[in-house]
Amino acid sequence: MRRPQRPSPMPDDAEPAPVRGNLPAELNAFVGRDDELTGIEPLLRESRLVTVAGVAGVGKSRFVTRVAALMEKRYCHGVWLAELSAVQDPELLEHALVDALGLTDHTGRPPRAVLVEHCAGRRLLLVIDGFEHLADACAGLVRELLRRAPRLQVLAAGRRPLRVDGELTYPLMPMNDGDALELFARRAAAVRPGFVLTGADRETARELCRRLDGIPLALELAAGRLRALTMEQVLHRLDDRFRLLTGGSPSALPRHQTLRTAIGWSHELCAPEQRLLWARLSVFAGQFDLEAVEYICSSPGLPADSVLDVLDELLAQSVVLREDSPVGSRYRLLDTVREYGAEWLRATGDAERLRRRHRDWYLGLATWCELDWFSPRQAEAAARVDSELPNLRRAMECSMESPEEAHLAQYLAGTLWFYWVGCGRLSEGRHWLDHVLEAESPYDHSRLKALWVLGYVSVLQGDPVGAVSALQECREEGERAGDATAVAYAVHRTGCLSIVTDDPVRAEELLREALGRYREIGELNSNVLMAQVELGMAVAFRGNLEAAAAICGEVREICEDHGERWALAYALYVLGFAALRTGEDGRARRMLGEALSIAHAFHDLLGTVLALELLALVTAVEGDAAEAAVLQGAADRIWPSVGLPLFGSVHYGRPRAECEERARAELGDARYDAQRRSGRRLDARAAVARALGGGTGTGGAPVADGSAGPEPEGEGADPAGDGTAVEGASGAAVAGETRRPAASRTTGRGGPELG
């Protein structure tokens, strides 16, 4: 689709060209939307009726006008725009289209007959904008025109489809980050001549665009505020965006002059039950699913069995967006739409009840996911919690608002242990555990569980002081309360601490005691299996490799019986360690390769980096010192997102030291250092792919200057490089792929420690 060529000027005596339509001239530059302009073209070739649907302010009117202008040459009888937002009476719809087409008829014929006769023999494009409040009448008229005018094509823009047979709907989404930033910058320059985004200003503008959901109307209104405010002031005032974002162009349609009016237009078009559900959906943070909506939002006035139909109408009107995810169909509200609904929910006086129902639902969801973690549904449980994390955060926040309900926040933070340690959320888990334990509460099961989980996380982060404090308190108060489960976990995690602080004798003693306590209370889950794995590691560190292999071989069998994969990865790590120490290099590589694959699938950075460290030594033993150094460099890049490298442990650090010694001896210091630096250019995904490739070539070549790429910024940025390819052992390039974390995420990838 290309911009139409302007006709060359006509001589004075030439006949005037026929009227080609009534599209308005653009008053400012059209920005972005290249993908959308390309994407709608096949629909226009396929159907005679295409409706561009989207949320208020997303730019539907400007978009369809642009599309129509680019297609103008295709229609010998012109492109005609009918703006219907000002037409309130359905009886006047036909008259409005007659006026838009520039028709004059002095007969007594009905206007519909005039429209049909005019369109019947002409090839023209009719652009209908703002029809939502006249949807039924407009659908009937368009249906008849299309039937009786075979060369007519209709391009419509509205909050919902017309629902006419043969209609194709093109959902117009908010602008992507780049287009949004460009639009804001251009409109800002129009009100503040010389305005240019540089340095920190660019990041502020990016955040502003993100906060405004990439909605063009909101971005243009925000840019207009730069006449009086700085960008930082605009950003700060977005908490009251409906008050801030006013003062649109006087030439704009009334519904486009303030953000509140634009969203309110959609609200007015909703039926009462749709408005009620819209308000109640504002209780969600991020995505949500149908089951949650049916439980949380239903009431006598909105029965659960009617929720799907009402939700479907909100989807049709572009109030709610549907998104596919690894856990199925999900829904969400844009932040701007959510805030509008939240205002109405507060006005109903029902906000607190809805927040409690929301919290209760997600308490139950976390409980079920913890149970599913020890089952073949482990991966699904991880994906479900990942998708629900914003709602789980909100549930904890809700519980912390009342001292009487703090124990529910403690329960939720403790129940999510498997996600904090198994799916790379150590930092966020530590934040929540510290936070919920600040509240005064009895030493019930919820508080005791939060304590031992805090101790566990502290061990993994290399914080022995914090771990001892939490675990000792858990054990003492658990014994006082007679909570045998809490005591067993406290003993277990104290055994973990002993391993990483290089006391395998004490670790073996405590882990055997913990396993005995687990048997007494009938406990069997991933934590219990990890206690066995950690016992195997302690035994291996003491030199009894045969016993270690037997212990972890049993764990492997139990994992396979129950479909457990996460603990299996750590059992395979110990089995690989034992195989390497007994000279079975091939077996060690197979075990460690499987462990690495599983850990990476769970985004468990600790499991990933431990396996990488041992695979580096296997590679060195196999004779490829250069590749071993590259893998060590890749591990260097991951550790800052996990915690203290190798826990600061002599036992865990010995394979790394041995690998380095072998590689330096073969390569020399300069080449070894260059290879290791080149490994730091690999992100986690590229490092895993490289390690699983076998490392059997002649050694990787360093990058040109041997310099390392940027380090991950703590536990919130997946340890990704700059995408620079590093030449592999066989000479092939392996590109580092940067993973962009979801907006809701504030932590990176970590995982449970082995010892």
Image: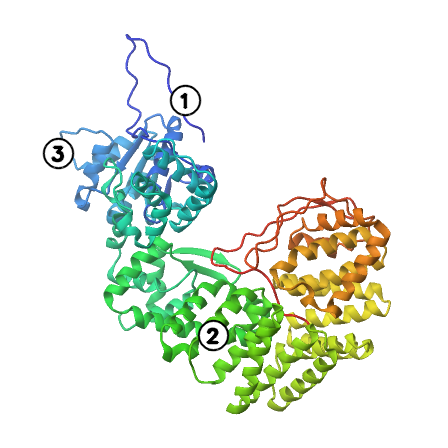
Residue 143 visible at all: yes
Q: Are marks 2 and 3 in contact (CB under 8 Å)?
A: no
Kindly identify the amino acid type of the residue bearing the numbered disc 3.
Gly
The residue depicted at 67 percent of the width and 88 percent of the height is 516
| Marks 1/3: CA–CA distance | 41 Å
Asked if the residue at tag 3 contacts the one at tag 1, i.e. Cβ–Cβ closer than 8 Å, the answer is: no
Question: Which residue is under mark 2?
Answer: 412
SS at mark 3? loop
Residue 277: give x, y in percent of width and height.
31, 63
- Checking the image for residue 5, the label placed there is 1
Check the image and report above or below for 69 versus 142.
Answer: above
Q: Residues within 10 Å of mark 2 (few under 14, many from 20)?
A: many
Looking at the image, residue 431 sits to the left or right of residue 698; the answer is: left
Task: Identify which amino acid the numbered label 2 is placed on.
Answer: Leu
Mark 1 or 3 closer to N-term? 1
The residue under the point 55% across, 77% down is: 371
Residue at (79% x, 60% y) in the render:
617
- Which quadrant is home to the N terminus? top left
Q: Nearer the viewer, mark 1 or mark 2?
A: 2
